[in-house]
Image: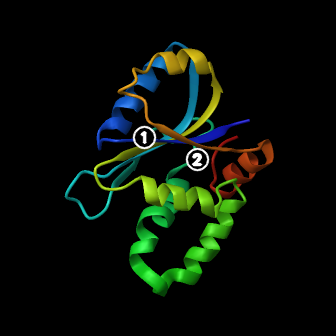
Amino acid sequence: MSTLTVWKFSTAEGADSALNKLRELQKQQLIQVLDAAVVSWPTGRKRPKTYQAMDTVGAGALGGAFWGMLFGLIFFVPLLGVVVGAAAGALSGKFTDYGINDDFIKELQTKVTEGTSALFLLTGQVTVDKVEAAFTPEEKGELIQSNLTTEQEAKLRDDFGAEV
């Protein structure tokens, strides 16, 4: 079973710093990062910068299509207004199939704002206590978590063309 987690940080650089630390922890086999993406919203910008942070050829990677649609739904569709409202509703319904519901999306919209960042992770095995201990209180972000069932994970990978 995989877990989709979102870590919100109080600075625009926090997500990048956390990802660098997680890469080191992965080398120690304390966490298995299947895929990751970063949202950074520097102060003064109208919208956030987003990018997929992992090599997409690795087994388990979701790919740019997934992250692009998710970030579009969370950060860019609300800016476009009612013109794309029906399409956004259909897309939002599609993400429910993967365990990502409207409440999860709305919470992200209210918490990931200008001056903050977020790290989106799809992880496998995690040694939680050791990973948690590797982060100082200043480095820790607010964790918003959405567990994916095995069925949701398989559907997600099937729909977005990722390797199982």
Image marks 2 and 1: residues in contact by CB distance under 8 Å: no
Question: Nearer the N terminus, badge 2 or badge 1?
Answer: 1
Disc on res. 107 = none
Q: Which residue, given by chain and number where applicable, does mark 1 sit on?
A: 53
Front position in the image: 28 or 15:
15
Question: The residue under label 1 is which amino acid type?
Answer: Ala
Q: Residue at x 78, y 42 (%)?
A: 150
Percent across and percent down for residue 157 are: 67, 49
For the residue labelled by badge 1, is the local secondary structure a helix, a strand or a loop?
Answer: loop
Q: Image quarter for residue 141?
A: top left
Q: Quadrant of the C terminus?
A: top right
Front position in the image: 14 or 91:
14
Percent across and percent down for residue 52 are: 43, 46
Q: Residue at x 29, y 39 (%)?
A: 13
Disc on res. 62 = 2
Percent across and percent down for residue 39 are: 39, 49
